[in-house]
């Protein structure tokens, strides 16, 4: 009995250093959440407005005030003139989780399309901003579409819109440009709403205020799309990485608490 106890003690001490190392390895390998918006300026981000060169912030569209990333059109004059745009995070991402808060405010810009009312989006797996043509309104990407309610009617948030790409929803390839979320949620007024996008190994999930509202998989480049097909290399249509960006679609919108985890 004494020999067994002594052996147990020896083995316990022998195992302790390895156990600590393993615990340390696990802790160090855990994904780290980081803020990718400093609340002061647009450092780490690049804008592209349709009809203007990369990096030109026409009309001060993208601005930072009071710790909030704001998209505005007060310097556009009386005609929006299809000057759609996007603000791109400078790092290409593969597997990640993105969380942020957003809210619609104010009035749609004069001359905007009818669908521009309280419409915006977060684009993911996008082509690089440097590859977007000067007269290209939207990048090849998939999008978490943002809608704001008009105070009365349902206007659900979170549908997936695929520009130059295809995805699978419940195993079926999407047949329309935008596909609605499974769980319908409409937010009226200027309230802050939490958005989350999770991308991991070809599975993409949309969340709204913490609730999963849509899952889709297997993003690929659309071989029949004029822009999408240009990025197909050696017949490989699989999309496994890309850039994220926030749309400027003609209605003022605010973003804050932009947090990213890379897997």
Image (cartoon, rainbow, N blue to C red):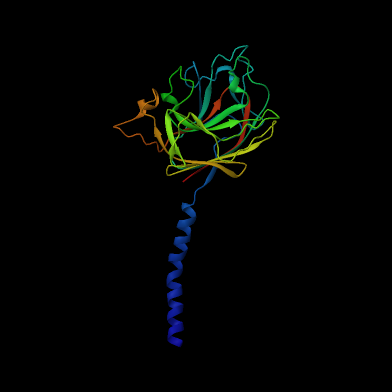
- Residue 115, by quadrant, is top right
Q: Is residue 189 left or right of residue 54?
A: right
Please state the horizontal and vertical placement of residue 17, each as a whole percent of the image.
44, 66
Q: Which of the two residues, 220 or 53, is positioned nearer the viewer here?
A: 220
Please state the horizontal and vertical placement of residue 260, each as a whole percent of the image.
53, 41
Please state the horizontal and vertical placement of residue 166, each as a whole percent of the image.
42, 33
Q: Farthest left residue?
A: 234
Q: Is residue 109 left or right of residue 97?
A: right
Total marks shown come to: 0
Could you tell me which residue is drawn at 57 percent across and 28 percent down? 120
Q: Farthest bottom residue?
A: 1
Could you tell me which residue is drawn at 50 percent across and 18 percent down? 50
Q: Quadrant of the N terminus?
A: bottom left
Q: Which of the two residues, 42 or 48, is positioned nearer the viewer here?
A: 48
Q: Which of the two residues, 175 or 32, is positioned nearer the viewer here?
A: 175
Q: Does residue 101 lie above or below 53 as drawn? A: below
Could you tell me which residue is drawn at 59 percent across and 22 percent down? 116
Q: Farthest top residue?
A: 78
- Residue 38, by quadrant, is top right
Q: Is residue 200 left or right of residue 213?
A: left
Please state the horizontal and vertical placement of residue 223, each as a whole percent of the image.
36, 28
- Residue 82, by quadrant, is top right
């Amino acid at each position: 009995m004494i020999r067994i106890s002594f052996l147990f003690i020896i083995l316990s001490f022998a195992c302790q250093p390895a156990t600590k190392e393993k615990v340390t390895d696990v802790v160090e390998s855990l994904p780290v959440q980081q803020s990718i918006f400093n609340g002061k300026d647009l450092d780490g981000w690049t804008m592209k407005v349709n009809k203007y060169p990369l990096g030109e912030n026409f009309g001060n569209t993208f601005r930072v005030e009071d710790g909030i990333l704001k998209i505005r059109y007060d310097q556009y004059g009386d005609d929006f003139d299809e000057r759609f745009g996007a603000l791109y995070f400078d790092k290409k991402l593969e597997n990640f989780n993105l969380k942020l808060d957003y809210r619609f405010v104010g009035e749609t810009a004069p001359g905007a399309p009818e669908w521009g009312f309280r419409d915006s989006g977060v684009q993911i797996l996008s082509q690089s901003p440097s590859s977007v043509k000067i007269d290209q309104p939207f990048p090849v990407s998939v999008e978490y579409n943002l809608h704001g309610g008009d105070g009365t009617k349902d206007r659900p948030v979170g549908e997936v819109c695929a520009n130059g790409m295809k995805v699978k929803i419940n195993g079926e390839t999407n047949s329309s440009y935008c596909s609605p979320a499974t769980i319908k949620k409409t937010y009226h007024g200027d309230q802050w709403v939490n958005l989350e996008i999770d991308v991991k190994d070809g599975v993409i999930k949309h969340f709204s205020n913490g609730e999963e509202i849509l899952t889709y998989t297997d993003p690929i480049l659309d071989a029949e799309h004029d822009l999408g097909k240009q990025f197909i290399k050696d017949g490989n249509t699989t999309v496994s990485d890309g850039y994220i960006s926030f749309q400027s679609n003609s209605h003022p919108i605010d973003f804050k608490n932009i947090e990213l985890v890379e897997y």
